Amino acid sequence: MIERIHPEGMPSLGVPLSPATRAGGFVFVSGQVATDDDGEVYLGDFAREVESTLDNLEAVLAAAGARIDQIVKVGAYLTNATLFAPFNEVYARRFGAAPPARTTVVVDFGRADVRVEIDAIAYVG
């Protein structure tokens, strides 16, 4: 069975996707970006952007009945290679000593208000 996950109260950024899809024992979380308290895309302090992006990722996981420690694979997308070190600082703090597998790439999102996007796959059994 496949279930589309739309967390209650999460604003839509106006793109055609489900925030997450649950299929069997896996939850696939679409790319999340940083948002402010009003649900608008946040651009500012980069560490806060990463924290907000991970907060949104965790909120989508929770709506699907999953937790961050169940993530088995992360895709991280940065707009500039110079962001790699500050990204790693926040990421390491949030995932701890046993982080999931990860791919990190530098991309051009084609928009100036997004510097980091993160997607994930969680195994929930």
Image (tube, rainbow, N blue to C red):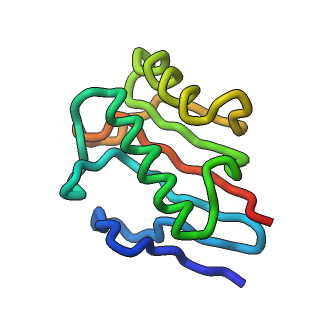
Q: Is residue 13 above or below residue 41?
A: below
Q: Residue at x 44, y 69 (%)?
A: 17
Q: Position of residue 118 (x, y in %)?
A: 49, 44
Q: Position of residue 117 (x, y in %)?
A: 43, 43
Q: Quadrant of the N terminus?
A: bottom right
Front-lying residue, 28 or 10:
10
Q: Residue at x 70, y 52 (%)?
A: 70
Left or right: where does residue 82 sit relative to residue 11?
Answer: right
Q: Is residue 11 above or below residue 69?
A: below
Q: Position of residue 44 (x, y in %)?
A: 22, 31
Front-lying residue, 8 or 85:
8
Q: Position of residue 93 (x, y in %)?
A: 55, 28
Front-lying residue, 45 or 94:
94
Left or right: where does residue 70 sit relative to residue 40?
Answer: right
Residue 38, picture quadrant? bottom left
Q: Quadrant of the C terminus?
A: bottom right
Q: Residue at x 28, y 49 (%)?
A: 35
Left or right: where does residue 44 sit relative to residue 80?
Answer: left
The residue sitting at the bottom extreme is 1
Left or right: where does residue 63 sit relative to residue 110?
Answer: right
Q: Residue at x 70, y 27 (%)?
A: 97
